[in-house]
Image: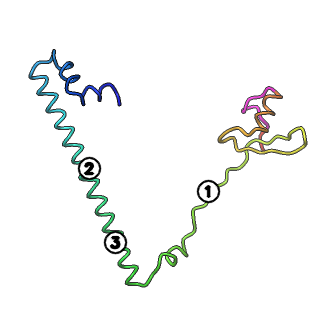
Amino acid sequence: MTDFIKTLTRKNSLRKQCQDMSLADIDKVIADLNDIRAEIEEAAQRHAEMEQAKQQQVEEIQRLMKEAGIGLDELKQGVEPVARKSVKAKYVITDSEGQEHSWSGRGRTPIAFREYMDQNNLTKEQLPTVE
């Protein structure tokens, strides 16, 4: 909890912070907080309405599936999972044991590449690339 929130939620802390404020300033703060409260309530209401509409659509789809005699397994049959694209190797090295290692250059640096770069005092940009 931030210090600001602690001040707002504790009456004595809030009273202390408001000591030097005029009544007009306090009224302005109250009006602003009420506006913010109304915005939050509206957003929550919109969210609840969207969730309710979504639930009604799900129920309608379930009803249509029942009427058509379609099960979930049948529905899944024609759909294939989205396959991730494999990224081609950008860098290739041969370690001291003669084993070839390739790396796309994405993500964490593999141990073999880290060791190779340390031994040869190279940066990632200086690594041999795949032709």
CA distance separating discs 2 and 3:
22 Å
- Residue in the picture at 38% in, 75% down: 62
CA distance separating discs 3 and 1:
32 Å
**The N terminus is located in which quarter?**
top left
Magenta span covers which residues?
A: 121-128
Coloration mode: rainbow
The residue that mark 2 highlights is: 44
Which labelled disc corresponds to residue 60?
none
Q: Answer left or right for 109 relative to 99.
A: left
What kind of residue is marked 2?
A: Ala
Which labelled disc corresponds to residue 84?
1
Q: Are marks 3 and 1 in contact (CB under 8 Å)?
A: no
Across and down, in percent, residue 4 comes to 30, 26
- Residue at the far right in the pictured view: 97
Which labelled disc corresponds to residue 59?
3
Q: Are marks 2 and 3 in contact (CB under 8 Å)?
A: no
Q: Earlier in the sequence, mark 1 or mark 2?
A: 2
Is residue 92 within the magenta segment?
no
Vertical placement of residue 106 versus 20, above or below: below
Q: Earlier in the sequence, mark 2 or mark 3?
A: 2
Vertical placement of residue 74 versus 4, above or below: below
- Residue in the picture at 22% in, 48% down: 42
CA distance separating discs 1 and 2:
36 Å
Query: Which structural element holds mark 3?
Result: helix
